[in-house]
Amino acid sequence: MNRPERIEEETAALMRGIGEAAKAASHRLAIAKPEEKNAALRAAAKALRAATPKILEANVLDVEAAKAAGRLASYVDRLELNEKRVEGVAKALEEIADLPDPIGTVLAEWTRPNGLKFQRVRVPLGTIGIIYESRPNVTADAGALSLKAGNASILRGGSDSHHSSVAIHACLVEGLRAAGLPEASIQLVPTTDREAVGLMLRGLDGAIDVIVPRGGKSLVERVQTEARVPVFAHLEGICHTYVDKAANMDIAVPIVVNAKMRRIGVCGATECLLLDKNATADIATPLVKALLEAGCEVRGDATIQKADPRVKAVTPDDFGKEFLDAIIAVKLVDGVPGAIEHITRYGSQHTDAIITDDEAAAERFLNEVDSAIVLVNASTQFADGGEFGFGGEIGIATGKMHARGPVGVEQLTSFKYKVRGTGQIRPK
């Protein structure tokens, strides 16, 4: 047997073991008491704080390797940790622990004329496979949310964040151990071999119930093409902010700058600014100037270039593009209908916003823009599970089956029917 074949067999054996352990753990988690799960999360948060120096040391290795590989600044920003970000991860675990436990919640109940009593009750999905790139905080968010919803999880982080993810995962395991829950409840795939991803997509012999991809377009496309289990798709964040002729510019300018520049590498960053052509002179100049002064490259047509000579010429390829950089495309549109038409054509059904004081325009935008998240007079960077009060998220689902928007605790559950009778039989 040559070396590649031996490595492939070793990876297959490794992943089979991970799948079997996860399946066994999922049975225990399905009946775990809320206090047990919450104790694990709080112990993990405590362990994270204690291990902050080790986590940051591990993160330095990942960041230095990413820089040496010539990764974009936005990519490095998603990867980089500091004390504040580690504390944010720990707080998110505690916030998830504080959420109501979804398992066992009665969603509906009714009694039929024959006396049968029906209940629709929330239950775990089982085992969730999460495949993600560059963001080490996803290791904690995904493992914690899955645990809270009574699911086992198999985490496969990107090779770029491997050292950081290993350090964070060790804290999650410490929390599980402290609460007396199976350590296999949250497993991190220890190999960076890409074959491990393929095996997860094939379901690990029935061990995985759903796959959640979180990463770039190529990762999501691979998952959707190869997966043999259900997928919660997290596509590109091609987000738009439309500034209407009735916009209050005192709030429009800071919203637009925040939506683009707060963090340029997140999926909720605005990539395209739409301006009402019926009020171009009034709104283009202050917005373009503010973006340029914030360090953003602005690309627009001749009309936008007149607002500031620093504006670069826009090309058709700039629309429908996720820059993940300090670059924004600007487009003039014919009011709300034009904005909706552009978003329908170029958007990714992720997050889109309107800035206006016209209630009718806002309602039309809310009703007709078919995206997972639609905002009025707020930054698209609120596309985050923590901001929704979910404690965190595994990703922003842009599909329409089962989960849409931030995938939090409730979205990681299914339901079953409990039916109670008193001897009923069905007549012939």
Image (cartoon, rainbow, N blue to C red):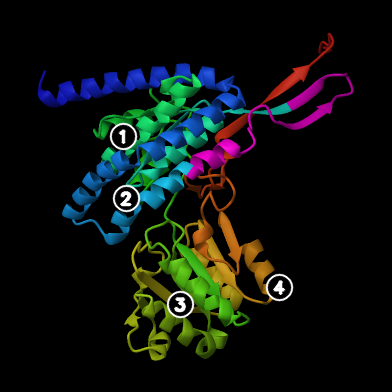
Residue corresponding to mark 3? 331
Identity, as a three-letter code, of the amino acid under mark 4? Ala
The Cα atoms of the two marked residues, 4 and 1, are separated by 50 Å
- N-terminal of the two: label 4 or label 1? 1
Q: Residue shown at 49%/72% (left/top)? A: 256
Q: Is residue 420 left or right of residue 176?
A: right
Numbered range of the magenta stretch: 91-119
Identity, as a three-letter code, of the amino acid under mark 1? Val
Q: Is residue 157 left or right of residue 129?
A: left
Residue 295 picture location, percent across and down: 34, 75
- The reply to whether residue 201 is in sight is no
Residue corresponding to mark 1? 166
User: Is residue 272 shown in magenta?
Assistant: no
Q: Secondary structure at mark 1?
A: helix
- N-terminal of the two: label 4 or label 2? 2
- Between 374 and 141, the one nearer to me in the picture: 141
Quarter holding the C terminus is top right
Direction right: furthest residue: 113
The Cα atoms of the two marked residues, 3 and 1, are separated by 44 Å
Q: Secondary structure at mark 4?
A: helix
Q: Residues within 10 Å of mark 1 (few under 14, many from 20)?
A: many
Residue 92 picture location, percent across and down: 50, 44
- N-terminal of the two: label 1 or label 2? 2
- N-terminal of the two: label 3 or label 2? 2
Which tag is nearer the camera, tag 4 or tag 2?
2
Q: Secondary structure at mark 3?
A: strand
- N-terminal of the two: label 3 or label 1? 1
Identity, as a three-letter code, of the amino acid under mark 3? Lys
- N-terminal of the two: label 4 or label 3? 3
